[in-house]
Image (cartoon, helix red, strand yellow):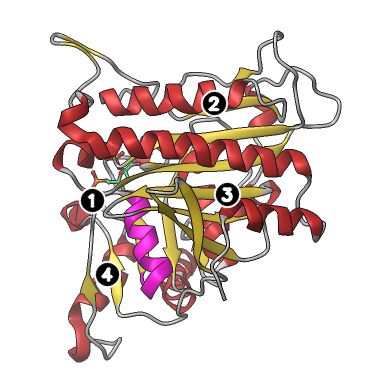
């Protein structure tokens, strides 16, 4: 059968009553913005877009206190501009902005809230390694016309759509509207996303894990014990050898897991304990957890299902464990045993 385009897939979902016209339009607009980002990322040094934002000696910083890259700022601007005037959104929030923004009065307002990490994996931008965009869509509460930060603080279970784009050897969009996880590859000549994987399934078991091992000495005891047992391989209690991969772009690591299985960890450690973790709940953990669960995987903080976390802040950080179900459950069990010990 001829592969279908993203547009056709979305129309089919609308006709099946799984999304409405506004959500379809919203996803189309985000996908179009991601194509523009893909072009900028693809040009690399030729586009003059590599390197840090700001001026030498006056480095531009985001709300998280992290140095911004030119492409972080550009991608954020592309997504903001594309989504402001479509009429399907009530407000937007970005990892790169201090606060959410209601849609300006000059434009029509819709019923959805969009959150995004415009360019995830910033440290890989300048070295030509895959980076990506992550997004999440929530409903704006019924009685709210001009949403503030507090209206975005909904648990991951409230998401109506989540997706990411990975800008790698090919540009891919992976999407869920709560009925499976599907992948689309950008046909650069035609300029449209074409479905290349329907109903992605993450294998339940795996022998591959992703973690930044350089933080090992800072982890909590249950994480030390769990990874210690993975490293012990065939001779250890797990009775099998594990392989390790760490791209350090969450989108690329999650994409590998969706494609061939594996587990991804960014646990809490002594360095990020005060902040609650390294990765952001609203822009990274929740959308990726929705996508992973819809592909049969699991996602947890180590102590709670990720999608059940009730957010307390727009830029809240959390420990993240997601991927092949059996392996996430194994890691969670180490935490449960540790916490239950007298
Ligand atoms: P980055 O800081 O480069 O934007 O979102 C944060 C993130 O990348 C993830 O994409 C990635 O998985 C992780 O941080 C990398 O962390 P380390 O620098 O500790 O490897």
Location of mark 3 (residue): 162
Q: Residue at x 57, y 21 (%)?
A: 100
Residue 224 placed where, x, y %? 27, 64
Q: Residue at x 30, y 28 (%)?
A: 71
Please state which of residues 107 and 228 is positioned toward the viewer in this rendering.
107
- Alpha carbon separation for disc pair 3 and 4: 30 Å
Location of mark 2 (residue): 82
Nearer-N-terminus badge (3/4) = 3
Indicate the secondary structure of the residue bearing disc 4: helix
Q: Quadrant of the C terminus?
A: bottom left
- Alpha carbon separation for disc pair 3 and 2: 18 Å
Residue 21 placed where, x, y %? 77, 42
Give the number of the mark in front: 4 or 1. Answer: 4
Confirm whether residue 295 shows in the render: yes
Residues rendered magenta in the picture: 250-262
Q: Residues within 10 Å of mark 1 (few under 14, many from 20)?
A: some
Q: Quadrant of residue 133?
A: top left
């Amino acid at each position: 059968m001829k592969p279908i385009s993203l547009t056709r897939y979305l129309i089919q979902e609308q006709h099946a009553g799984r999304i409405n016209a506004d959500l379809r339009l919203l996803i189309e607009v985000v996908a179009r913005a991601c194509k523009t980002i893909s072009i900028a990322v693809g040009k690399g040094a030729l586009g003059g877009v590599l390197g840090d934002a700001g001026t030498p000696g006056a480095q531009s910083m985001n709300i998280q206190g992290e140095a911004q890259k030119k492409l972080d700022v550009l991608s954020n601007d592309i997504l903001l501009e594309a989504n402001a005037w479509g009429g399907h959104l009530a407000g937007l929030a970005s990892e790169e902005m201090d606060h959410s923004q209601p849609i300006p009065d000059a434009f029509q307002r819709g019923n959805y809230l969009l959150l995004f990490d415009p360019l995830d994996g910033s440290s890989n931008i300048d070295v030509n390694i895959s980076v990506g965009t992550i997004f999440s869509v929530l409903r704006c509460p019924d009685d709210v016309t001009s949403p503030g930060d507090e209206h975005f603080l909904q648990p991951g279970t409230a998401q109506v759509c989540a997706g990411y784009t990975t800008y790698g050897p090919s540009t891919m969009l992976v999407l869920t509207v709560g009925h499976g996880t599907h992948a689309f590859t950008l046909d650069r000549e035609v300029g449209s996303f074409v479905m290349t994987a329907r109903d992605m399934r993450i294998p339940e078991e795996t022998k591959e894990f992703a973690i930044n091992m350089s933080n090992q000495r800072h982890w909590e005891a249950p994480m030390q014990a769990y990874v210690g047992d993975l490293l012990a391989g065939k001779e250890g209690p797990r009775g099998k050898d594990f392989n390790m991969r760490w791209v350090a772009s969450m989108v690329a690591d999650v994409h590998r897991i969706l494609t061939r299985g594996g587990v991804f960890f960014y646990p809490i450690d002594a360095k990020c304990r005060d902040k609650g973790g390294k990765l952001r709940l609203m822009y990274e953990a929740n959308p990726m957890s929705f996508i992973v669960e819809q592909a049969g995987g699991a996602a947890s903080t180590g102590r709670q299902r990720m999608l059940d976390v009730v957010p307390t802040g727009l830029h809240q950080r959390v420990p993240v464990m997601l991927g092949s179900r059996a392996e996430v459950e194994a890691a969670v069990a180490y935490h449960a045993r540790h916490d239950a010990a007298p």
